Image (cartoon, rainbow, N blue to C red):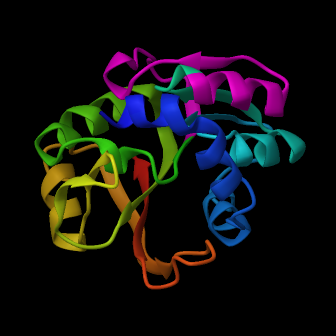
Amino acid sequence: MSIEYYNNFAEDFIKGTIVADLSELRDRFLKYLQVGVHILDLGCGSGRDAKVFLEKGYQITAIDGSSACCKLAADYIDQEVLCRTFKQLSFTEEFEGIWASASLLHVPYDELTEIFLLIDQALKPGGVLYASFKYGDFEGQRNGRYFTDLTEVRLMTVLKPINHFEIVETFVTDDVRSGHESVKWLNVIARKK
């Protein structure tokens, strides 16, 4: 359902998100990584963050489940974007960092642990994950897409079976997009032990 939405509305979605200033969140993530390491942009959407990471000297593999977003993002970052769903992740200890900004929130709650296990597999030991979810306990359809909102408790529940992950920090932020100021986001940075 969500992938179909992004295929149908990719250009409008990208126009609404490509200018969002996530520099504070990116910097908070990057402080745990050395310049030049390999980052997976998981659910890259427009390619906004992948482009910044590339400009800062990082190696980037960008992935999105929407073929329309993949095409537009590839043009934007001037490199291939892999068209894969989260369940199709098949990397083994390839990345020092994984950036999943507002992407995993489309995974049903009862499937999140499985996806986090695939993320864990893709990270090198000591690697760092950033992920963000709308804050709350809602799960279901919202504006043509499927959303899983998380609180700190719901996050800990899905991460508990993964004993490799150490939560470095969780924090709540306001939405930076114009017209979305009332939306809160749960952010998590975790390290693979």
Place residue 107 in its image quadrant: top left
Q: Is residue 182 above or below residue 146?
A: below
Query: What residue lies at 24% left-to-right and 72% top-to-bottom?
Result: 152
Query: What residue lies at 73% left-to-right and 66% top-to-bottom?
Result: 23
Does the stretch in magenta take in 103?
no
Q: Residue furthest bottom?
A: 182
Q: Is residue 182 above or below residue 40?
A: below
- Let me know if residue 193 appears in the view: no
Q: Position of residue 24 (x, y in %)?
A: 69, 72
Q: Is residue 88 above or below residue 3?
A: above
Does the stretch in magenta take in 91?
yes
Q: Position of residue 54 (x, y in %)?
A: 82, 38
Q: Nearer the viewer, residue 47 or 38?
A: 47
Q: Quadrant of the N terminus?
A: top left
- Let me know if residue 169 appears in the view: yes
Q: Which residues are magenta?
A: 68-97
Q: Nearer the viewer, residue 17 or 193?
A: 17
Q: Nearer the viewer, residue 187 or 97?
A: 187
Q: Position of residue 122 (x, y in %)?
A: 44, 26
Q: Quadrant of the C terminus?
A: top left
Query: What residue lies at 60% left-to-right and 30% top-to-bottom?
Result: 69
Query: What residue lies at 69% left-to-right and 64% top-to-bottom?
Result: 20
Q: Is residue 18 left or right of residue 96?
A: right
Counting labels gives: 0
Place residue 108 in its image quadrant: top left
Q: Position of residue 119 (x, y in %)?
A: 38, 33
Q: Nearer the viewer, residue 171 or 81?
A: 81
Place residue 186 in its image quadrant: bottom left
